[in-house]
Amino acid sequence: MRRQDGRKRCEALAKKIEGLGGQSLVMQLDVSDTGQVEKMIETTLTKFGRVDVLVNNAAIMRGGAFLDVGEENLREHFEVNVKGCFSCCQQVAKQMIKQGSGGKIVIISSVDGIEAEEGVLAYSASKASLIVMMKCMTVELAAHRINVNAIAPGWVETDMTVPYLNESFEKELSRRIPLGSLAKPEQMAGGALYLASPLADYVTGHCPTPNYFTLHGMVRKRMATDSSLLRLLLLLG
């Protein structure tokens, strides 16, 4: 994790884990820095002796329409969201192969990596990259019994998304979500827990979309009522 307030929450969770008799390790780092990622893996191995599960959840989201997105905005998204995930996956996969007993890798993508949404081009492109990366890793790591899957949530109430939410926008999002409301982080945890568990030993290369929502419901509605487009679709059909 990167944020200072996030560190406090992690440390509070670590105390709960240890209170139940478990072990924990909290580290703060920049995943876009390969050296820091390598140090994280080394420290983890020193503490626990092995790595069996990796969940890639570190990400940033900066708004910006296509015509306004600058090179720095694009670079930052790919440095953190894509390179950071790649570095963590590569380092952990090498260790899992060395251990010889397989493992589980879960990548947190986004529905924005599947559908198009206005104003988040760099974020969407980076999240789409993660889905393709997951599929490539699946093919190459299956022989080592390493399962690789992704999760593509819709809008979830987190520190990263709250600044973009207001009453009207949240109402519109909720209208387009089948379950009728934005998700809470803990509601996304179940999917990751399943993919990291023995229950998913024969599940690899998948990307479920919890709280999936229609990004352009209003646009599609207008398109569907355009008679010329309907005639074209009928001809093509």
Image (cartoon, helix red, strand yellow):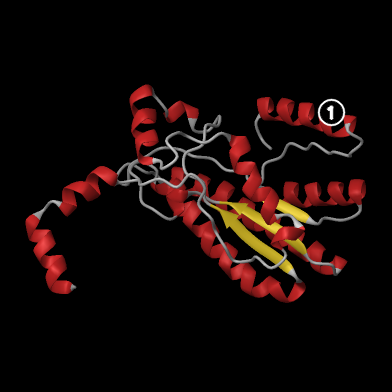
Q: Residue 94's image quarter?
A: bottom right
In the rendered structure, the answer to whether residue 170 lies left or right of residue 202 reads: left
Image location (x, y in percent) of residue 85: 63, 53
Rendered view: 110 above or below 162: below
Observer-nearest residue: 147 or 83? Answer: 147
Q: Which residue is mark 1?
A: 15
The residue lying at 60 percent from left, 54 percent from top is: 83
Q: Which quarter of the rendered picture does the N terminus lie within?
A: top right
Image location (x, y in percent) of residue 131: 53, 60
- Residue at disc 1, secondary structure: helix
Residue type highlighted by circle 1: Lys
Q: Residues within 10 Å of mark 1 (few under 14, many from 20)?
A: some
In the rendered structure, the answer to whether residue 20 lies left or right of residue 214 reads: right
Visible residue check, residue 10: yes
Image location (x, y in percent) of residue 173: 38, 35
Image location (x, y in percent) of residue 87: 67, 56
The residue lying at 75 percent from left, 70 percent from top is: 145
In the displayed orientation, state which residue is furthest to the top.
Answer: 167
Visible residue check, residue 56: no
Q: Residue 82's image quarter?
A: bottom right
In the displayed orientation, state which residue is furthest to the front.
Answer: 179
Q: Residue 8's image quarter?
A: top right
The residue lying at 65 percent from left, 63 percent from top is: 148
